[in-house]
Amino acid sequence: MPASWALTPPYFLILAFLCGVAGFRVGWRLGNRIALPIAQAALGWVAFLLAWSIAGAGWAAASVLFWALGTSLAS
């Protein structure tokens, strides 16, 4: 596996999907109705910023789509 694989655009899609799943699970486990959207938004924002700074605006928008898919499937 090449060392630069982690910086390819498909990586950000997978990362965003997993951030959506993890954000929902963490927020749900906290048991507070305010914690759920905060956890989801925080992890989604991390995925978005990483994709924006490394891969560009188009891939950042696609990562938000995959974050939403991960959140929706987890819920």
Image (spheres, rainbow, N blue to C red):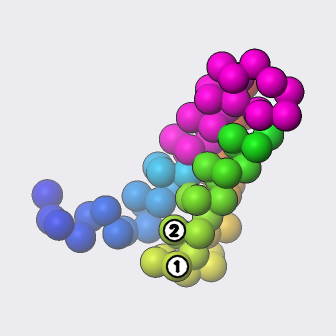
In the image, residue 31 above or below residue 49: above
| Front one among 43 and 66 | 43
Residue for point 56% across, 58% down: 47
| In this picture, residue 18 sits left or right of residue 28 | left
Q: Quadrant of residue 32?
A: top right
* Residue span colored magenta: 17-36
Q: Identify the residue under disc 1.
A: 53
Q: Secondary structure at mark 1?
A: helix
Disc 1 and disc 2 in contact, CB within 8 angstroms = yes
Q: Amino acid at mark 1?
A: Ser
Specify the quadrant that holds the C terminus.
top right
Mark 1 to mark 2: distance in Å?
Answer: 5 Å
**Residue drawn at 69 percent across, 23 percent down:** 30
Residue occupying the far right of the picture: 33
Looking at the image, residue 35 lies above or below residue 55: above
Q: Secondary structure at mark 2?
A: helix
How many other residues sit within 10 Å of disc 2, few (<14), some (14-19) or many (≥20)? some
- The residue tagged 2 is 50
Main secondary structure along the magenta-highlighted residues:
helix
The residue shown at (62%, 26%) is 25
Q: Quadrant of residue 58?
A: bottom right
Q: Position of residue 39 (x, y in %)?
A: 69, 41
| Three-letter code for the amino acid on which mark 2 is drawn | Leu
